[in-house]
Amino acid sequence: MYNKSILMGRLVADPELRQTPNGISVCAFRIAVDRAYSPKGGEKQADFIDIVAWRQQAEFVSRYFSKGKLILIEGSIQTRTYTDKSDQKRYAVEVVADNVRFVGSKSESDGGSRPAQNDFGAPPPSRNEGTLAAAPAAYSSGSADDFAEIEDDGDLPF
């Protein structure tokens, strides 16, 4: 069997971090995921999906995400039943997050407060003044004449 869910959406409210009696962090939140299809002339529709993150993922979400922020969730769908305060049996479907990632521009992520490993900007210039740094390749200025066709002799190299 295989149970994998990948979702990208916006947080509907600020995430809620709690601790279990054993001291394990758990964070519950809901995201709105736009549907790919919307009726002609109609409004965009969205699905609201409950997410649960545990331990370090829970602390990460509660620290770096807030209402309206774009988020990517990788996880699995789980179902559970419980009895509410009025003794009614309830059924819940939620995604248990295995991996949570930033999505979108740096300005959407609280003015660049995200960790440096997710910063995909250009590398800093070389600080060695005595050496010449190679200029970046200008791929946009190439033409089809810059490439040569490789003849196929039918023999695969593996």
Image (cartoon, rainbow, N blue to C red):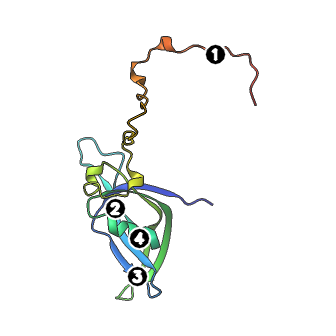
Q: In this rendering, which labeled residue sits more in front, label 1 or label 2?
A: 1
Mark 1 and mark 4 lie on one chain; the one further toward the N terminus is 4
Which residue does the image show at 40% across and 28% down from the upper left? 135
Secondary element type, mark 3? strand
Q: Which residue is mark 2?
A: 31
Q: CA distance from mark 1 to mark 3?
A: 62 Å
Secondary element type, mark 1? loop
Question: Is residue 93 in sight in this rendering?
Answer: no
Question: Is residue 133 in sight in this rendering?
Answer: yes
Q: Which mark is residue 150?
A: 1
Q: CA distance from mark 3 to mark 2?
A: 21 Å
Q: Which mark is residue 58?
A: 4
Q: In this rendering, which labeled residue sits more in front, label 1 or label 3?
A: 1
Q: Amino acid at mark 1?
A: Ile
Quadrant in which the N terminus appears: bottom right
**Residues marked 1 and 4 touching at CB (< 8 Å):** no
